[in-house]
Image: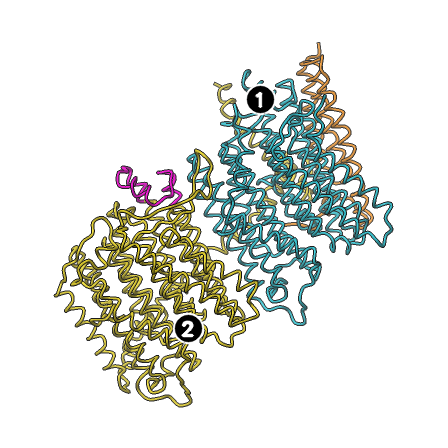
């Protein structure tokens, strides 16, 4: 099975042209093709994981095979290859599983949408790119798929392209990611310039013994810009909240398994690079920690259900990046996995609500639990998992990160992490109390979603409960002896940390209950009292506004300046030259030059300047 | 006994061009469309011959070099000419002029480029260059009803003639200091006798001449005007093929005759490349006319191509060849879309492209993906091309140059996306109809779109060919 | 004794005069004439180099003939274009050719 792993992205990649060109008009067939393709990938992914477990494929002894994609003998060799180790195997499973469930769910959600077939085509391509990224055995290939993921996200976020905001959001995601990709690209070019290879394993062998850490640190920092953009870390997080303009299943896919996971996955893949540079690791850890806190504070005040979830994603990604930064790849990947399940569930649940109500403002919902029992109960399970209430999945993975921070002596990060856990529990249950409980708002007609939508919810709910146990500290040979960097290690349960995080999670839920569990004016009064802070948070620290301003001022200003320069200075200078020559009595009628002759003059001036520049050394010799 | 069979491609092209002129006199006016098809079919036939001859090599009459490098570029010109011809059907018909002359000129320009790419000797090089330039002047001014077109023609002619005078002066100095016009012999002379001041001055003049043709800043100023004024298909052809031809000849002259002076001229190319990339990309941002935008973007693209020259390596030359080929599809794709739009709406303004995606998904997609390819975004072919170019200079330790290039290609995404934004986000004007695109042009569009993807996803065969053709210049 | 350098000086001067004409004249025809002078300067160079450096070969002279032919073609096209513009605008001033600009 491992030897045929390259087929995993090929199935959905083939589904894309089939759907777009052949089955576009036959909607059920399009859905069937899409689901069958990703289903086949899922089955293969399970097979691969099984073989990895049985055949003793470990992080140190992965399976790799490749053929040359581009080769210029002696100069350049780029492979198209597959690298399968437990890390990739786990990712494959997560991505295919979530993508499969999302596609099944979309059958119900997108029912009746004019772009139904196209949507499945895009979803297939999106999954294919992500799976290709997971399998990549070198930087070049990972970058290739990385960009493809970006392109697909652009298509999917802007899916309702007739909606201005959606199209804008698509563009924003694309542009922000380009900035990040630029850094990433430069970074691995640097690595190539140093080591002459793109291959992960060859680099892993070469990096630890490389001496010039300054240059290496620069390369690592540049590579890190990639995950900052893709995994929506501060300050390039701005695209993710807007990305929910896409259809909700897409948000689920982007937030859980494909797009944002790519950044964290890259950190794990390139871990050897970061691990050899303590300074960069610290940077990674603090960027992650800061993002986690920053996004959690914004989430408290948002009213749009998808926006709250979006900020919670940013915050949780911050956790993962922080885990990588403190040196615990295991914890980061573990959290990525559990988070994929419960975040997908949250988004699909939110989609179910939106599908039923056509409403996204939580304060205009209320009392939904009576009408949407499956949706609400699965949503609550996911929220409990996200909040880190034992024994659900989120508790174990989050706890491993916090324990890691605590054990490695990052006290500051540990405190931040715990604070974020508190905030997370608070804003999630604020959402739940406001939207799902309390009184039913007038004029709302909620109804439970069809089976195609609720079944994936239930499956994900089960996973949100049980998936944490694979990495729970009392399980020997669990996740930590499977996906790791360096030597496999078993984290001893740290009961103090566990207890504290359970307490803060419950405290967060309790506070949410106090403020929002029953009708009260306390939240409004609080908002009134701390008006400036509230406004700051509601407006997301004005980051978007600052970027917009900067973009307009700097970007367009610069362009205008150059344009102006070309229009005025270049012509002006030559008019000036004309003045000077006329003053000196020559009838060089430069002032009357039309454009054509100005151009000619520029050409000749350039020739003369070049000649003088080149002759300067020679002339200097003559003069001496 | 000269080995004339090596000249098959050139002879066929000349015959086709002249034959079309004659045919134009014979065919009745009502049936002129047939000439366009004959021209396209003829070009396709010659293309097949050229592909069959891709491995041929030899020297004809002591100074005309047939080698994989030259043939690679001939294939490129033929492909570009074919796309241009297909693109011109409706456009030329609308102008209502003698179609036979138009296609004959198109083909003779192609012949000029072929000679330019293959000549190993300065006299034929110059003749090829002028054949190309003069036919392009006529083509640029072909739209008799449009004063802008005439202005474009005269500007191209006068500036082109001035630049070729400089170029020629340079050639005379090089001839004077080496006593021969055969490029290979000049190389030997330079290697044994070293460089004289006259030779260096000649080198600078020649460089200026080439810089004019490839639109390197500050020799670029003609190009936006001419591109805007010329008929759109001609602009497309001018921007891809004449640039590629100039690069081919540039490589032949500088790598063939002056490799020993590369420390001298590489510095000049660095300066030109930097100016070209920076200015081209920045000035493209505020443009409102699609042809002007593409003109500046193609100036910027020339800057990236110059990077390959700067690297002075097999990888660099191969990258130039590869990039030039995919640039044909990328840029011609954009121009095909622009032509289709012009044929329907008679406008080149970007703001009129609003809502194009809903009026013609194919044209909008072609424009979008062509622009994305020009911007160098995977999986489009442009990404692989840029990657080679940047790799080639990184391998020569010009890392700052690579950073600048990548940074400016980020900038380019911005203005390319402005067009995309208009096409996909804007609302089509009231009462606008779906675009009518001729079936032939549609086929050409789909083909070039597919090729852009194929070259991006599986570039190896073309890369190998490009790199192998580049090896010629580095053999002892 | 007239040496190669004398010829080259004449050629250089002629080139500069032509250049001046091409840059300074307002009339398109005059600009074309300036360009012709520049090309002829090159011809002087070519023939002189031929005569002094390799008198037994005629490469330079042949080159010069090619240049003359090409120049003639260039002028023919140039005049046709100028005529076209003149007919349209009653004007052959280079300055007025500014419909296409930055």
How packed mark 2 is, by other alpha carbons closer than 10 Å (few <14, some 14-19, many 20 or more), is many
Q: What residue sits 54% from the left and 47% below the top?
A: B455
x and y percent of residue A553 in the render?
A: 46, 58
Q: What residue sits 26% from the left and 67% below the top?
A: A467
Please provide the residue range marked out in magenta: A188-217
Indicate whether residue A315 is drawn in magenta. Answer: no
Question: Image height check: is B237 above or below B286?
Answer: above
x and y percent of residue B426 in the render?
A: 57, 66
In which image quadrant can residue A284 be found?
A: bottom left
Magenta span: helix, strand or loop, mainly?
helix
x and y percent of residue A338 in the render?
A: 28, 65
**What is the letter of the orange chain?**
C
**What is the letter of the cyan chain?**
B
Element marked by disc 1: helix
In which image quadrant can residue A197 be found?
A: top left
**Chain designation of label 2:** A
Q: Nearer the viewer, mark 1 or mark 2?
A: 2
Q: Quadrant of the N terminus of chain B?
A: top right
- Indicate the colouring scheme: by chain
Q: Which residue is mark 1?
A: B187
């Amino acid at each position: 099975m491992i030897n045929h792993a390259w087929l995993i992205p090929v199935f959905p990649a083939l589904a894309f042209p089939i759907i777009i060109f052949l089955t576009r008009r036959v909607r059920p067939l399009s859905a069937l093709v899409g689901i069958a393709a990703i289903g086949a990938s899922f089955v293969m992914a399970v097979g691969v994981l099984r073989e990895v477990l049985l055949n003793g494929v470990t992080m140190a002894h992965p399976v790799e095979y490749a053929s040359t994609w581009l080769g210029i003998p002696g100069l350049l060799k780029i492979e198209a290859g597959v690298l399968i180790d437990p890390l990739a195997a786990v990712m494959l499973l997560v991505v295919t599983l979530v993508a499969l469930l999302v596609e099944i769910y979309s059958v119900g959600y997108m029912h009746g949408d004019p772009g139904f077939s196209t949507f499945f085509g895009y979803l297939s391509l999106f999954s294919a790119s992500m799976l290709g990224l997971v399998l990549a055995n070198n930087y070049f290939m990972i970058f290739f798929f990385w960009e493809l993921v970006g392109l697909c996200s652009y298509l999917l976020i802007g899916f309702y392209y007739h909606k201005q905001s959606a199209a804008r959001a698509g563009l924003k995601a694309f542009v922000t990611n380009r900035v990040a990709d630029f850094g990433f690209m430069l970074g691995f070019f640097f690595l190539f310039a140093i080591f002459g290879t793109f291959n992960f394993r060859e680099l892993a062998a070469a990096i630890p013994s490389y001496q010039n850490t300054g240059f290496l640190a620069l390369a690592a920092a540049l590579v890190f810009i990639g995950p900052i953009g893709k995994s929506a870390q501060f300050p390039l997080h701005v695209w993710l909240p807007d990305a929910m303009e896409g259809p909700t299943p897409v948000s689920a896919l982007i937030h859980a398994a494909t797009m944002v996971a790519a950044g964290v996955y890259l950190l794990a893949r390139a871990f050897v690079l970061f691990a050899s540079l303590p300074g960069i690791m610290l940077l990674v850890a603090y960027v992650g920690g800061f993002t986690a806190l920053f996004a959690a504070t914004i989430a408290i005040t948002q009213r749009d259900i998808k926006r709250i979830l979006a900020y919670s994603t940013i915050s949780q990604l911050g956790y993962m990046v922080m885990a990588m930064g403190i040196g615990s790849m295991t914890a980061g990947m573990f959290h990525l996995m559990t988070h994929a399940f419960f975040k997908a569930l949250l988004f699909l649940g939110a989609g179910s609500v939106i599908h039923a109500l056509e409403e996204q403002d939580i304060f205009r919902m209320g009392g939904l639990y009576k009408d949407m029992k499956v949706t609400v109960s699965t949503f609550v399970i996911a929220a409990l998992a996200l909040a880190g209430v034992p024994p659900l999945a989120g508790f174990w993975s989050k706890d491993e990160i916090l324990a890691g921070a605590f054990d490695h002596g990052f006290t500051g990060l540990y405190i931040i992490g715990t604070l974020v856990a508190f905030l997370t529990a608070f804003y999630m249950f604020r959402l739940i109390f406001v939207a799902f409980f309390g009184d039913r708002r007038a004029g709302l007609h909620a109804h439970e979603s069809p089976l195609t939508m609720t079944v994936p919810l239930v499956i994900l709910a089960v996973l949100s409960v049980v998936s944490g146990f694979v990495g729970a500290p009392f399980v020997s040979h669990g996740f930590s002896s499977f996906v790791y960097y360096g030597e496999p290690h078993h984290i001893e349960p740290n009961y103090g940390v566990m207890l504290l995080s359970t307490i803060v999670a419950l405290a967060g839920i309790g506070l949410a209950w106090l403020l929002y569990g029953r009708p009260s004016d306390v939240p409004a009064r609080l908002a009134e009292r701390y008006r400036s802070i509230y406004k700051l948070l509601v407006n997301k620290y004005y980051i978007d506004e600052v970027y917009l301003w900067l973009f307009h001022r700097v970007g367009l200003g610069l362009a205008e300046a150059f344009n102006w320069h070309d229009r005025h200075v270049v012509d002006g200078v030559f008019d000036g030259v004309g003045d000077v020559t006329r003053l000196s009595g020559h009838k060089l009628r430069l002032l009357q030059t039309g454009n054509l002759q100005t151009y000619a003059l520029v050409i000749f001036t350039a020739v003369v300047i070049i000649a003088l520049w080149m002759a300067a050394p020679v002339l200097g010799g003559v003069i001496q | 006994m000269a080995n004339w069979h090596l000249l098959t491609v050139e002879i066929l092209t000349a015959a086709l061009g002249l034959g079309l002129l004659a045919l134009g006199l014979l065919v009745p006016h009502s049936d002129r469309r047939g000439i366009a098809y004959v021209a396209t079919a003829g070009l396709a036939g010659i293309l097949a011959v050229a592909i069959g001859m891709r491995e041929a090599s030899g020297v004809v009459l002591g100074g005309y070099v047939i080698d994989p490098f030259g043939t690679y570029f001939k294939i490129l010109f033929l492909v570009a000419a074919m796309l241009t011809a297909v693109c011109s059907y409706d456009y030329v018909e609308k102008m209502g002029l003698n179609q036979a002359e138009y296609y004959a000129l198109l083909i003779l320009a192609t012949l000029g480029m072929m000679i330019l790419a293959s000549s190993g000797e300065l006299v034929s090089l110059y003749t090829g260059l002028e054949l190309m330039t003069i036919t392009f002047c006529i083509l640029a001014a072909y739209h008799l009803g449009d004063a802008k077109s005439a202005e474009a023609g005269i500007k191209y002619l006068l500036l082109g003639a001035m630049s070729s005078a400089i170029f020629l002066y340079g050639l005379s100095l090089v001839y004077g200091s080496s006593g021969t016009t055969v490029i290979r012999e000049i190389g030997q002379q330079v290697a044994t006798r070293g460089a004289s001041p006259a030779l260096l001055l000649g080198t600078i003049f020649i460089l200026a001449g080439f810089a004019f043709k490839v639109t390197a800043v500050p020799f670029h100023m003609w190009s936006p005007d001419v591109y805007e004024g010329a008929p759109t298909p001609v602009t497309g052809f001018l921007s891809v093929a004449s640039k590629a031809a100039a690069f081919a000849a540039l490589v032949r002259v500088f790598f063939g005759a002056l490799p020993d002076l590369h420390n001298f001229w590489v510095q000049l190319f660095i300066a030109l490349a930097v100016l070209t990339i920076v200015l081209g990309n920045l000035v493209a941002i505020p443009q409102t006319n699609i042809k002007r935008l593409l003109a500046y973007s193609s100036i910027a693209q020339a800057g990236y191509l110059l990077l390959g020259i700067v690297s002075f390596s097999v990888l660099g030359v191969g990258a130039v060849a590869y990039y030039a080929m995919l640039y044909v599809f990328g840029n011609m794709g954009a121009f095909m879309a622009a032509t289709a739009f012009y044929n329907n709406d008679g406008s080149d303004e970007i703001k009129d492209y609003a809502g194009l995606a809903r009026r013609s998904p194919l044209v909008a997609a072609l424009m979008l993906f062509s622009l994305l390819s020009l911007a160098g975004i995977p999986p489009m072919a442009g990404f692989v091309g840029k990657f080679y170019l940047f790799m080639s200079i990184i391998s020569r330790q010009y890392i700052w140059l690579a950073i600048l290039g990548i940074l400016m290609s980020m900038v380019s995404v911005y203005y390319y996306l402005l067009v995309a934004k208009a096409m996909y986000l804007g609302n089509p004007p009231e009462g606008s109809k779906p675009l009518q695109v001729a079936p032939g042009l549609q086929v050409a569009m789909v083909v070039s779109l597919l090729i852009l993807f194929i070259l991006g996803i599986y570039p190896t065969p073309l890369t190998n060919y490009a790199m192998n053709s580049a090896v010629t210049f580095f053999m002892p | 004794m007239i040496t190669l350098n004398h010829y080259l000086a004449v050629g250089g001067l002629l080139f500069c005069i032509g250049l001046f004409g091409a840059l300074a004249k307002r009339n398109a025809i005059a600009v074309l004439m300036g360009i012709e002078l520049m090309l002829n300067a090159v011809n002087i160079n070519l023939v002189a180099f031929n005569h002094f450096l390799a008198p037994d070969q005629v490469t330079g002279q042949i080159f010069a003939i090619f240049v003359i032919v090409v120049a003639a073609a260039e002028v023919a096209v140039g005049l046709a274009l100028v005529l076209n513009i003149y007919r349209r605008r009653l004007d052959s001033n280079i300055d007025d050719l500014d419909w296409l600009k930055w």
